[in-house]
Amino acid sequence: MSTPADQPSLLPRPKGRVLPTLDDDGNRRWLRPRLSPGRFLTRRRAVGYALMALFLALPHLTVAGKPAMLLDIPARRFTLLGLTFTPTETPVLMLFLLAVFVGVFLLTALFGRVWCGWGCPQTVWLELLFRPIERLFEGSPQEQRRRDREGPDVRRVLKNVVFLLLAFVLGNTFLAYFVGAEQLGHWMRGSPAEHPTAFAVMALTTAAVFFDFAWFREQTCMVVCPYGRFQSVLLDRQSLVVGYDHARGEPRGKVGKAPPVGDCVDCQACVITCPTGIDIRDGLQMECVHCTQCIDACDAIMDRLKRPRGLIRYSSQAELAGEPRRLVRPRVLAYAAVVTGLVVALVAVVSTRRPAEVTLLRTIGVPFVDRGERVEVHLRVKVHNRADAPRVYAITLAEPGLTLAPVAPLTLGPDEAATAVLTVLAPRERFAGGRATARVVVDDGQGFRQELTAPLVGPLGGGP
Ligand code: SF4
Ligand code: SF4
């Protein structure tokens, strides 16, 4: 009897592989990679567990009384290592973002996708926490596949309960980076009815983390993350990659079989261990996250066969093709020069940051009032206190001949901003061509003093 699988599909079949996680008919192909212990896995575990600890601890750490890291989007304040930045600090944000972008280019040109394999939370949490827990509950890849065929059992259900708890911890830790650990604790202690929005956000983050690590998994790297797609332009033939030594391995074949073969015994160990389901022997592929599991798998086989390790190894496309390896090249030098320049500029801007920001705003309403001998002009001055303590800002004029109507000093708490409206009286003859200037001084009496030159608009026929 023919089954649906035997019947010809009405849909066009793709020619060749679309994604390793998809069957020909477009259904999900679950990857059940086998763990390959080895020197790289040991190192990745050390790095990965340290990063996990850092991720969990960072929202609870303080530097100089402030969170070590807080991205307070509603308040539009970003705190990093005791320094608070606001979106108005455009040069700092611009330099920081540029330095990060060009830094990623440099890192990729030198070390390929080292970030993906060793530092990205997606790989680190999935491969070093969620998959090990899955193996604990569901056993070997063969047993997991049996469960795929036969349907979920109690062990799979229990595993998903543990995943859900972990997703709750991870999702809420992630949230703490945006709202602060204290606020999050407050929400968690309160009833959901008291904080319905906060509760919804917490539930959504937990659900998103659970969906990602329990179901979507490696597809995040393949179809969501743009970094993998950029590889073709960010990598060159000299970049470090996990690569298969084609010249040494081919022609592949079983041990002892004639005709003479290369070192690859076609055992498939590198394929069944790959968490993205690819065969590294097909060459550099977008799906490869450089997790090094195929290196460990192949090294173990080579050890058993008493052949040298490194049939799959960290190398470069040029080196694998027999060309010399060149670490220093124009692209690397250019990126390094730009990153150095940006970091130096960033350090200079941050270290010379002033404890307050004073901005002259546009006048609202009529630009001036003609009072005969004198002209009345209104100015608006915004002061933003960036210091960690309250400050009182006195506003005066440093312009002989002009009079400033009494203006109350601005008392501002840390990170507070306020606008003062100044009324300036200027002699009519000061306005040459309808224009004059006034020097406005803002002083907090504790070392901060800033002088601004404000343009005054007056009557056209006022000047000499
Ligand atoms: S693990 Fe090594 S020997 Fe085995 S198939 Fe892969 S490359 Fe060949
Ligand atoms: S090909 Fe190797 S390095 Fe790349 S993802 Fe697969 S196992 Fe990891």
Image (tube, rainbow, N blue to C red):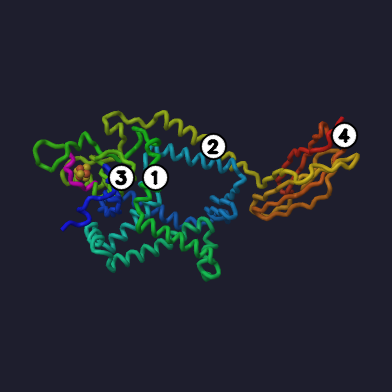
The mark found on residue 115 in the picture is 1
Q: Position of residue 319 (x, y in %)?
A: 29, 32
Find out whether residue 151 is within the magenta segment: no
Among the two numbered marks 1 and 2 on one chain, the one whose residue lies closer to the N terminus: 1
Mark whose residue sits in front, 4 or 3: 3
**Does any atom of ligand 2 lie closer than 8 Å to the CB of label 4?**
no
- The residue at the far right in this view is 373
Among the two numbered marks 2 and 4 on one chain, the one whose residue lies closer to the N terminus: 2
Q: What element carries label 1?
A: helix
| Rendered view: 79 above or below 155 | above
Q: Residue drawn at (34%, 49%), measured in percent from left and top?
A: 44
Q: Residue drawn at (39%, 30%), measured in percent from left and top?
A: 328
Callout 2: few (<14), some (14-19), or many (20+) C-alpha neighbours within 10 Å?
some
Discs 2, 4 touching: Cβ within 8 Å: no
Q: How many labels does the image show?
A: 4
Disc 1 residue type?
Trp
Disc 4 residue type?
Glu
Callout 1: few (<14), some (14-19), or many (20+) C-alpha neighbours within 10 Å?
some
The mark found on residue 18 in the picture is 3
- Residue identifier under label 2: 344
- SS assignment for the magenta stretch, majority: loop
Give whichever of 389, 135 is nearer the camera.
135
Q: How far apart are marks 4 and 3 (CA)?
A: 78 Å
Q: Position of residue 442 (x, y in %)?
A: 74, 45
Callout 4: few (<14), some (14-19), or many (20+) C-alpha neighbours within 10 Å?
some
Q: Position of residue 276 (x, y in %)?
A: 30, 48
Image quadrant for the N terminus? bottom left
- Residue identifier under label 4: 429
